[in-house]
Image (cartoon, rainbow, N blue to C red):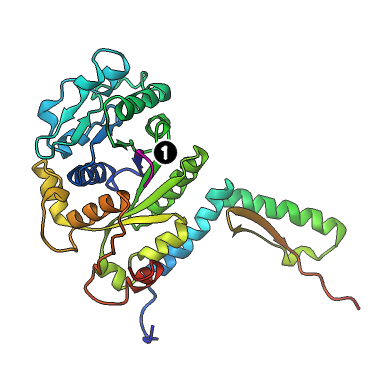
Amino acid sequence: MNAKAIVVTSGKGGVGKTTTTANVGAALAKLGERVAVVDTDVGLRNLDVVMGLEGRVVFDLIDVFEGRCKLRQALIRDKRVETLHLIAASQTKDKTSLSESRMRETVRALLEEEGFDRVLIDSPAGIESGFQTAAAAATGALVVVNPEVSSVRDADRIIGLLEAREITEVRLIINRLRPKMVKRGDMLEVSDVLDILGVKLIGIVPEDERVLVSTNVGSPAALEDGGAKTTAGSAFRDIARRIGGEDVAYPDLDGSKGVFSGLRRLFGGR
Amino acid sequence: MFNFFRRRRSKDDLKQRLKLVLSYDRARLSPGKMEQLKRELLGVVEKYFPSDGDDLDVRFEQHGDRMVLIADLPRPPHH
């Protein structure tokens, strides 16, 4: 993706935005990019705990917005991956200082003054001001969707709002896909979701218990190297490589031909 | 694909329902309002073509990027 500032969004809550931000951010940093992940879910911050950095939050995004600290003081460096940094959301309820212009200025400073290659912005659920602020500075978007009715409907709404903001690089991540349910026809398959939503795909993440286990201990699954190609961790690493411009083949998630063959055809069998 | 006795797959229902609800979402019109529109259109059509309005079909269709409102009224052949 050409976009340096990318908002991670979904409309619906609980589909995996924060997990995706943490994992894709960590995987991008492991590829050598200087990455800042920014939590904009003011009042309900969680990116810090998902990444295991909650004990090191001193200043947050609202402190930056209101001038209580310098931008650099709010940047928490991840000790596992040197090039990965977090700016936490404020846990207080006060959202009044969440302004689009401050958001744009902060992202600009991260890219131009602090030398980051990529800023990933974790959006709150919903389509209200929190989402609008998160999207304000973005030139690209990762829309996270689960293959079920309410998530797809909300994703469609969000895609419309992103297009209204003239965010042109909108890419879809289908999260929590269950290959066995797809195989027996009880879950939308990837081609169905793409057909309905009409945006480009950048990742398919299978339902994987290891994601929960890794968030329990505050270590993104994407950082656990090795293992099968069918793990969520591997899928997040593939997404990072695709963002970086690499052509990465989609693995056969259910171990049999058929379900994903249409998809492989769609991408020229790469 | 070869199993004609297979039960209906729930995802086929879901896909159909999603396509319908998204067509209303994208057109920013609720199904209830659509019914109202259809009734009113029917009233107008009745005024010009008495007793012909029964076959009126009103729906949204996605044409590329645009939602298009289709009102379909078959005319009986001339006699």
Residue at the (37%, 32%) spot, across then down:
A134
Dominant secondary-structure state across the stretch colored magenta: loop
Could you tell me which quadrant the C terminus of chain A lies in?
Answer: bottom left
Q: Residue furthest right?
A: B79
Q: Which residues are magenta?
A: A1-6
Side (left or right) of B68 relative to A185: right
Q: Nearer the viewer, residue A21 or A249?
A: A249
Q: In this figure, which residue is indicated by the disc labeled 1?
A: A139
- Crowding near the residue tagged with mark 1, few <14, some 14–19, many ≥20 C-alpha atoms within 10 Å: many
Percent across and percent down for residue A241 are: 26, 52
Total marks drawn?
1
Q: Would residue B33 be found to the left or right of residue A216 on screen?
A: right
Foreground residue among A85 and B57: A85
The kind of residue on which mark 1 rests is Thr
Q: Residue A236, how many percent across, how many down? A: 23, 52
Q: Position of residue A171 (x, y in %)?
A: 39, 50
* Chain letter for the residue marked with disc 1 in the picture: A
